[in-house]
Image: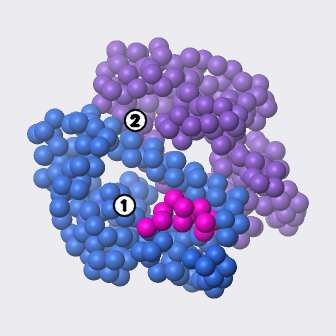
Chain colours: A purple, B blue
Amino acid sequence: MIDTLKNHILKFVSPPKSELQEFLNKMQLKRYNNKEYLLKEQQYCTHQYFISKGCFRFYFINQKGIEKIINFGIEDWWISNFDSFINKSPSEYNIQAVEDAVVFKINKQDLSAILANSLELNQYFRMIHERVRIADQKRIQYMYSLSGEELYTTFREYNPHFVQRVPQYMLASYLGFTPEFLSKIRANKKV
Amino acid sequence: MIDTLKNHILKFVSPPKSELQEFLNKMQLKRYNNKEYLLKEQQYCTHQYFISKGCFRFYFINQKGIEKIINFGIEDWWISNFDSFINKSPSEYNIQAVEDAVVFKINKQDLSAILANSLELNQYFRMIHERVRIADQKRIQYMYSLSGEELYTTFREYNPHFVQRVPQYMLASYLGFTPEFLSKIRANKKV
């Protein structure tokens, strides 16, 4: 299964074989059952996680006690709480499996040692971040410009398979509206 | 003025002197007057920009014709439209000076050549991205969890000097509410 990560890296960069192998050797496989937590509020995020299979949600609970999903992570995504990981602060977010999942994780010490020396793996993570920044920018833009119905249509257009994978109430939370409102949109669109 | 960039890089990494100098030599100084555009909608973003002095706003115009500010950039920030820069697509966003400004810019070819070889500069940009991702994540969290008044108070707490620098209607746009609503909050708080 480590080939999912190896192939993902090779899509972006071509590190020396020994360097790539050293990195892959540091990655530990971990399985999560549906609904199991990878990280809980107030815990410290000590690893970076590459999702080899499955889906996670990254969410927080707002002051009214309502779950708000900031992001989902699926195959070929890296997931972690950077703020907690870098600044060694307790997490404000929860990361929970929403399907049975397989991840590869690496701890801070091992990752730092690799990134202290590997040109290509720094390029790899730099490129990943650039792509996530584009996605985050679009997310903020959509939150500011689209109606509820447009948000759903746009999300569905860009993520056709994903819409089938997660419970509707989670999709509603991610898009910023109530499950009832999402049902209404779907009924209108007959989708 | 290039020392602002040099010092910023040295805060994060210690590249070989010649490598750092090669990078700095590629950076071109450009001045912008207040209200001048660094990038306009439909233009292609061909450079990355380091802000040495001044302030820019990164915004788009929504379907109702209303300006929506996604971000501001001030001293020591890199600014660009990554989507346009990486994917060679016409920009959906405008980047405009909101004060007289001085930037250093580098084009794609020069930046690619440097990042093909420099371990430390890849580390530098990777670290910058990590920090921006933390900020973007918090931004999305706040948009989902705070009331208008809390948004303003939180923004002011984290950016006390910045609140004085930009016109109030821009701050309102960034925080997602009307200028009238911001005036009301400020009147209530007597700030």
Asked if badges 2 and 1 are on one and the same chain, I answer no
Q: Residue at x 27, y 33 (%)?
A: B119
Indicate the amino acid at tag 1.
Ile
Q: Position of residue B95 (x, y in %)?
A: 39, 71
Q: Residue at x 13, y 39 (%)?
A: B17
Q: Residues within 10 Å of mark 1 (few under 14, many from 20)?
A: many
Q: Position of residue A34 (x, y in %)?
A: 78, 29
**Secondary structure category for the residue under label 2:** helix
Q: Residues within 10 Å of mark 2 (few under 14, many from 20)?
A: many
Residue B155 magenta-highlighted = yes
* Looking at the image, residue B154 lies above or below residue B12: below
Viewer-nearest residue: A185 or B28 = B28
What is the CA distance from the residue labelled 2 to the residue labelled 1? 21 Å
Residue A29 marker: none
**Secondary structure category for the residue under label 1:** strand
* Numbered range of the magenta stretch: B151-161
Which chain letter matches label 1?
Answer: B
Residue B159 magenta-highlighted = yes
Viewer-nearest residue: A56 or B34 = B34
Q: Position of residue A115 (x, y in %)?
A: 37, 28
- Identify the image quadrant of the N terminus of chain B: bottom left
Indicate the amino acid at tag 2.
Tyr
Quarter-of-image position of residue A123 = top left
Q: Residue at x 44, y 20 (%)?
A: A110
- In the picture of the structure, the residue carrying the numbered disc 2 is A124
Which chain letter matches label 2?
Answer: A
- In the picture of the structure, the residue carrying the numbered disc 1 is B79
Q: Residue at x 52, y 23 (%)?
A: A106
